[in-house]
Image (cartoon, helix red, strand yellow):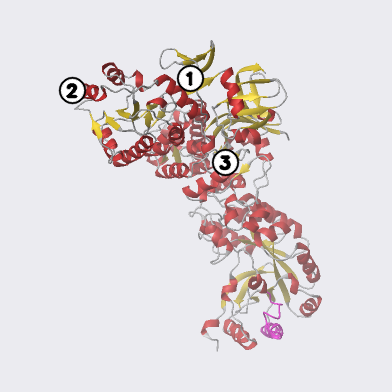
Amino acid sequence: MVLSMLLTKRDGCARIGKIVIDSKEFELPLLIDFLKKEEFEDLLNSMDFGLSPYVIKDIDSKRFDALKSRDENFLILTGLKTLSPKRIVEEIFKLVKNSKPIYTPALATPINLPLLIYLGIDIVDNILPIVDAYNGIYYTNDSKFKLQNLKSLPCNCPVCLNGIDALKNSEYEERSYLIALHNTYVMKSQIELIRETIRNENLRNFVEAKAKLNPELTVILRIADNLNFCYEFHSAFKKSKVYFNTLESFNRPEVKIFFERALKAYKPKTKTLLILPCSAKKPYLLSKTHKTIRRVCKIRVNEIIVSSPLVVPREFELVYPAINYDTPVTGHWSDEEISFVAERLREFVDKGNFERIIAHVENGYRKVVERALKDYNVEYTCNSSITSQDSLKNLKRALENRSEKLDLYKEIFEHMVRYQFDLEMNLEGKIKGKYPELELINSNERVLRVNKNYGMLDIYRVFAEQLIEAKKYVVKIGDFDPKGTIFAIGIENADERIRPNDLVVFYNDKIFGVAKAIMAGIEMVEAKKGMALIIKRKWNF
Amino acid sequence: MVIENVKPKFWVEKERLNSKIVDCLTVILRTSGCYWAKKNGCLMCNYIADAYPSTYDELVNQIEFAMSNKNFQILKIFTSGSFFDTKEVPEGFREYVYSKAYELGIKKLIVESRPEFITSKIVDELSALKFEVEVGIGLETANDFVREYCINKGFKFKDFERAAKLLKGKARVKAYLLLKPPFLSEREAIEDAINSTLKIKNLVDVVSLNPTNVQSKTYIEKLWKLKLYRPPWLWSVIEVLKQVSKEVDIISDPVAAGKIRGPHNCGRCDKDVAKAIKEFSLHKDISVLDVECECKALWEKILELEDYSRIPLVK
């Protein structure tokens, strides 16, 4: 038997890829359908399930050693169903950084499936939905019902199209089989949906929404977030919009990465600070409110925009997720929300040497500022609405006669370079383009350009050379001339800072170039299979 | 006479004797207990909890008490250990049992022992008796790996084989097989029992199939409480009986049948199915095993899926 695995896409811990066994292909994440066992016979026969369930390891390690799975290709975690949600996450957490695909037999249902994949499970099966079917349990995407309690079938699969009477009136064995078939349809459509969501880098939004339907799933998600689950596999830059819809949103890896990096990279320069509320439109500078304020007032000072859960210094407003998020705005701020945002605001303010703080905010935003900056003498300039005549007049007066200067676009580039590459640089050249599509040009050569789809900077030759010199976000490849894609096998070394979706510089003795990472840096070095980099441009030394 | 706290358990039941059904007195004597259980122990067993270091006189009292005012043709003496282990059953007590049995004119004596106590001296002792003797040995499975890691029995197949060959022709040999040791799936358990039966059919006179039950304070109970173990289905007992009954004399008297801690089906059919198994064991009529219930379809699914889940999928 020849088995190989190829990973092609990551979204956090979730991954898309395929395994090939004797020329038969299976797409990951994979649902093993035990109603069509024959289709998976080669795969199943290749697996060593061991005699003892995996969870015995903590109960009787001696017997576990004798009876455990000794599979060389897969991590087969049996018996997780018997553990508490907390323990399930902890067990997966211990193993998820391993490059072998993980299979959790008899654990998945349509309800927990997205979360399992989010946690990094590659292979699931329909064992529970089948057994449940024989106990009369009918699944939908988000819940389960006793068939006898249903008045109609909320599904359009071939089984359900025959109507509820046909199902209810059939004999036990046939009925059970039909429900199992239906439950499997639900599983299959879920897994297809999950694959699409991963492709769109959008799984977290989906998982948060699903978690709200079931307290156990919420527990699992919260515990995973508290463990910083797979933190290094989460992208710092994504093409998907972040929805801050739930309490769990505050703990998203995206939020943690943003604050961690932005706090480190933030270097405010002026003595005056202006605090503004966020806008629905992103980037904020394109919003009507921010435009109006800037039209009326000359703003040459540092600004921090208060949102929830984000707090965004103006310099970072083009960075993901600040450039691409939505948060439900009701005007009502919960106490937790106010505390969380106030703490972050305080951290940013403490990075500067502000002598004067003007807060042009109202309502909940004002509560945030009040809580964050109790010991500062904050000037509040807002009267009723932030763009009312009165308010604008107040703000204008407060900002008058300030002799400070700030080259905002240059600051944006320097902050983004620090944020994205952990690199301190005095950027030379001219900034061109219409906001937010800015680029940095030096001696007629493009150095950097804002990519607003990913909230990051795209990089060119001069900058790539500087990264090589700084040894940051670099990947050393073997002695070959790569085309299109570089696979893990061709990689000799990679910066551990690299996360999926990062822009990196690859090089060998002859050539260098810019590529997008598909894996994390640690994976590129460890994994033998899978796509590591997609080349964007390359040059000869 | 018998002191209250060392009362033996005993009852009269039906047994098969040369194709006739007769009364059998079963007595469980309170001995100091199985030496293996004290040392290490099998994963499914906690009979040691009933141990009491009875003296010769106390054992005589117990058996006298059990036998008083009863008619029976078969005497079954269990110690929950080894009848031939003199550390457990005091020297001389065996002689007392033999003479008592002879005195009462019983047709058959049934005892049990681990194989290490079955010596040629013991076999000579048994072959001198005027009535039939049957020695039960808890082989549990013919698979050494399963016996060691899933049962922790502490002897090998070759130990059993030696004992059985010594006994052969001098006394009847009964092998106990355990249906569903922990860590085997339902299907693997059936397969193990069938393979074991076929492997020993020429070494033994009768096989007693014992579906596992969950005794308190055992390793199995710990697994069971963690939902990592379920006793076998009664359908599995029937399956094994059907598959091997043509090959060998096999009986089964499931302990705690239909109970949640014993071998069970769905709850609706357990009584009938357990009854069929007992009927079969007495009358050897395979047709009584043709019982039906809806839950058989679920059991069939379980056979297919438990190989992969490695944990029970239903209660």
Other-residue count near label 1 (Cα within 10 Å), few / some / many at <14 / 14–19 / ≥20: some
Confirm whether circles 2 and 3 share one chain: yes
Labels 1 and 3 touching (C-beta < 8 A):
no
Task: Read off the magenta span.
Answer: B82-104
User: Which of the 4 image quarters holds residue A323?
Assistant: top left
Mark 2 / mark 3, whichever is N-terminal: 3
Residue beneath disc 2: A390
Mark 2 / mark 1, whichever is N-terminal: 2
The chain under label 3 reads A
The chain under label 1 reads A
Q: Cα distance, mark 1 to mark 3?
A: 31 Å
Residue beneath disc 3: A96
Position of residue B146 measured from the top left corner of the image (x, y, whole percent)? 69, 57
Give the left or right position of residue A232, taking residue B41 as reference. left
The chain under label 2 reads A
Give the left or right position of residue B167, taking residue A177 as reference. right
The stretch drawn in magenta includes residue B126? no
Image quarter of the N terminus of chain A:
top right
Q: Nearer the viewer, residue B52 or A24?
A: A24
Image quarter of the C terminus of chain A:
top right
Vertical relation: A109 (above or below) A52: above
Q: Cα distance, mark 2 to mark 3?
A: 56 Å
Position of residue A250 measured from the top left corner of the image (x, y, whole percent)? 39, 37
Residue beneath disc 1: A451
